[in-house]
Image (cartoon, rainbow, N blue to C red):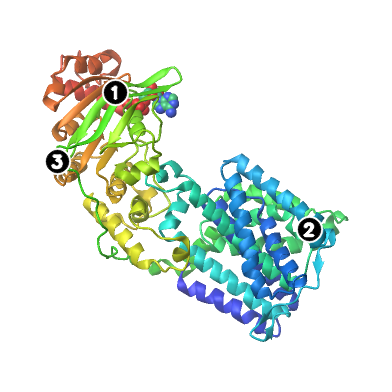
């Protein structure tokens, strides 16, 4: 959202209660919208951004409300002291619940949130000291430096200050190192783990963050309402908050406010209109919400906010398109020492992977030395990508070992392997299409600088962030994507997306780089540029393991080649040796009848030279990968 619109929104929020013509019920309504916005903001982060669906947020609102209700009435605490206590209790409860439920994934997580939402509701309703179903009444109003916030027009300012702070902090958080990790949770978990992101930890962080926002909302609610009872913290409210998040949209934190305002206003209106139409007081609005939810999911997956934002953009016209910022400048990040040229960097010994009855990798052994580019070639399905995934910890080997600079890799998870200095790209491109090219590459540098969540939410880490972004820009410049820093990654051509993956791997400062078909989809000139980059990296002491179908590319670039077929290593040697190796020719030309791309006009396949013979069928099969 741009500054002018933000200013208008803030000014409108600030002025509204001061106007004597503003009816009291508007203020009350806006207070409820603000309280809901806080909860929904957490849900946007959880459900929209991170893909963790929760039906149980209302329970955390209840936790905040009941904690302060009890502490201020039974123990006579000041509400301002009860707030940190409530946040502390919620923190512990959310952390514990998260540890249990976040292990579950998909539908099971949502079901888990239903379970805890229900059980906390019954806890509130059955505890004698919490007043059972009557709840707790007689809660004192807040007082702020002598000003009583008993009046709705006064607490309004506190509520909306909390909302704006929450929006600001959440936006800051998303635009930071932890934020990039959080944004990868929804669709790029395995990829993120390969760059050292502890996804389980970030899920817990998001979960606790959302619970704390809900708790804050509950605290404000208790002192605004001056009484609490279990019903507003039940499951139907948990579902309503989720509606708000889905309808508002997760592409921006403002979606939370839009969703809360829309649903609460609609609910208000429906509760006036529907009973008149149907002549009964049943909760018909739930049916309308259900229909609305289906419509939104069908026609506006991103929610309502993007539509509003788009409309605003059109009103302002095209002339206002922002200038692309310059690449970020900052000191360079520290680099890890490179092994000596010629020292063994990677040692794969009798590596084996079985998928059920299929032996995808059959006792393969090879070594890769410092400052060397090794090619791993073979027809489709030979087991090359599986070998990559075994080295990088995506799969656990059935037997055999992988050693990297004297460390056993085959017992480590992907993120520890990344920490040791192994960078990789994926055969099937794995990037976050709605993030910028620069941010995607910055995710690769995740382990090179530490930034905590609190520092990120307060934007107190800008110097470190600049270093990370600078590193990302340098790597993008190096691979030739310097003109695309602020482009959405999903808008790049597929070949460029592969190059982006190389920059991302380089941003992790690897000692060993594993590239799975990096030249696929590149034009001739782009391939030459890529070869030059890889050659330069080799001269700087990087070890590279390269899977590639373009034989010209492999033969001209590599020092040493291993050939696999049906999971088994069938040959190893220099490019010259491999080109004339009988087993290799057999593997590549064996299926010649169906595979060989016969150029139009050629009457019959001629016996090709070894070099061409390798190239043609490989590219033919490669395109079907
Ligand atoms: P390449 O990269 O050389 O084309 P892969 O390593 O992708 O080959 O695949 C080798 C074999 O293992 C193929 O037969 C493939 O179908 C099989 N395979 C790969 N991954 C899995 C998996 N996760 N589950 C079952 N089979 C797999
Ligand atoms: Mg493959």
Foreground residue among 152 and 246: 152
Give the number of marks.
Answer: 3
- For this view, does 378 lie left or right of residue 355? left
Residue at the disc numbered 3: 341
Q: Categorize mark 1 by other alpha carbons within 10 Å: few (<14), some (14-19), many (20+).
A: many
Up the image or down, 195 lies above or below 134; here it is: above
Q: Position of residue 321 (x, y in %)?
A: 38, 66
Q: Categorize mark 2 by other alpha carbons within 10 Å: few (<14), some (14-19), many (20+).
A: some
Residue at the disc numbered 2: 231
Q: Quadrant of residue 394?
A: top left
Tag in front: 3 or 2: 3
Disc 1 from disc 3: Cα separation = 24 Å
Between disc 1 and disc 2, whose residue precedes? Answer: 2
| Element assignment for label 3 | loop
Residue 327's mark? none
Residue at the disc numbered 1: 364
Q: Residue at x 57, y 54 (%)?
A: 207
Q: Are marks 3 and 2 in contact (CB under 8 Å)?
A: no
Q: Quadrant of residue 268?
A: bottom right
Q: Position of residue 517 (x, y in %)?
A: 28, 35
Q: Quadrant of residue 362?
A: top left
- For this view, does 139 lie left or right of residue 189? right
Up the image or down, 512 lies above or below 576; here it is: below
């Amino acid at each position: 959202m741009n500054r002018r619109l933000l200013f208008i929104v803030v000014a409108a929020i600030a002025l509204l209660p001061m106007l004597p013509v503003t009816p009291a019920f508007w203020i009350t309504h806006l207070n409820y919208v603000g309280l809901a916005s806080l909860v929904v903001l957490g849900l946007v982060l959880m459900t929209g951004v991170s893909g963790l669906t929760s039906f149980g947020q209302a329970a955390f609102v209840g936790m905040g409300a009941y904690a302060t209700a009890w502490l201020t009435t039974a123990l006579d605490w000041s509400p301002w002291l009860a707030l940190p206590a409530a946040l502390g209790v919620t923190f512990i409860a959310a952390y514990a619940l998260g540890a249990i439920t976040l292990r579950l994934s998909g539908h099971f997580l949502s079901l888990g949130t239903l379970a805890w939402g229900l059980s906390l509701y019954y806890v509130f309703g059955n505890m004698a000291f919490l007043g059972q179903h009557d709840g707790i009444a007689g809660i004192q109003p807040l007082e702020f430096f002598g000003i009583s916030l008993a009046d709705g027009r006064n607490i309004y300012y506190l509520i909306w200050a909390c909302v704006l702070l929450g929006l600001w902090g959440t936006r800051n958080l998303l635009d930071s190192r932890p934020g990039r990790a959080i944004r990868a949770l929804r669709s790029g978990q395995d990829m993120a783990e390969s760059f050292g992101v502890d996804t389980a930890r970030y899920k817990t962080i998001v979960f606790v963050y959302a619970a704390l926002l809900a708790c804050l909302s509950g605290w404000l609610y208790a002192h605004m309402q001056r009484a609490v009872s279990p019903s507003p913290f039940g499951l139907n409210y948990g579902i309503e908050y989720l509606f708000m998040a889905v309808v508002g949209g997760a592409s921006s934190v403002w979606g939370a406010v839009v969703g809360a305002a829309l649903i609460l206003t609609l609910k208000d209106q429906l509760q006036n209109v529907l009973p008149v139409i149907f002549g009964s007081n049943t909760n018909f609005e739930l049916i309308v919400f259900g229909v609305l939810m289906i419509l939104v999911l069908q026609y506006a997956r991103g929610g309502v906010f993007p539509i509003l934002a788009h409309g605003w953009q059109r009103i302002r016209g095209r002339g206002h398109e922002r200038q692309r910022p310059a690449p970020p400048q900052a000191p360079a990040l520290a680099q890890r020492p490179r092994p000596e040229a010629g020292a063994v960097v990677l040692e794969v010994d009798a590596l084996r992977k079985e998928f059920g009855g299929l032996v995808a990798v059959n006792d393969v052994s090879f070594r890769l030395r410092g400052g060397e580019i090794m090619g791993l070639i073979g027809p489709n399905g030979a087991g090359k990508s599986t070998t990559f995934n075994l080295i990088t910890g995506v799969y656990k080997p059935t037997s055999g070992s992988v050693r990297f600079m004297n460390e056993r890799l085959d017992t480590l998870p992907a993120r520890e392997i990344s920490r040791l200095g192994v960078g990789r790209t994926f055969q099937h491109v794995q990037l976050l299409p709605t993030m910028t090219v620069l941010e995607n590459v910055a995710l690769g540098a995740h382990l090179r600088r530490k930034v905590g969540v609190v520092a990120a939410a307060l934007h107190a880490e800008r110097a470190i962030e600049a270093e990370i972004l600078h590193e990302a820009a340098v790597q993008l410049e190096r691979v030739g994507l310097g003109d695309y820093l602020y482009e959405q990654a999903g808008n790049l051509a597929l070949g460029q997306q592969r190059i982006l993956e190389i920059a991302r791997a380089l941003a992790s400062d690897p000692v060993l780089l594993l590239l799975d078909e990096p030249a696929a989809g590149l034009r001739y000139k782009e391939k030459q540029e890529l070869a030059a980059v890889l050659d330069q990296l080799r001269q700087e002491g990087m070890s590279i393991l390269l899977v590639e179908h373009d034989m010209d590319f492999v033969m001209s670039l590599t020092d040493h080649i291993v050939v696999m077929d049906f999971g088994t290593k069938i040959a190893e040697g220099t490019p010259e040796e491999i080109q004339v190796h009988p087993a290799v020719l057999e593997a590549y030309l064996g299926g010649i009848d169906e595979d060989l791309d016969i150029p139009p006009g050629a009457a019959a396949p001629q016996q090709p030279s070894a070099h061409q013979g390798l190239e043609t069928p490989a590219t033919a099969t490669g395109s079907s990968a």
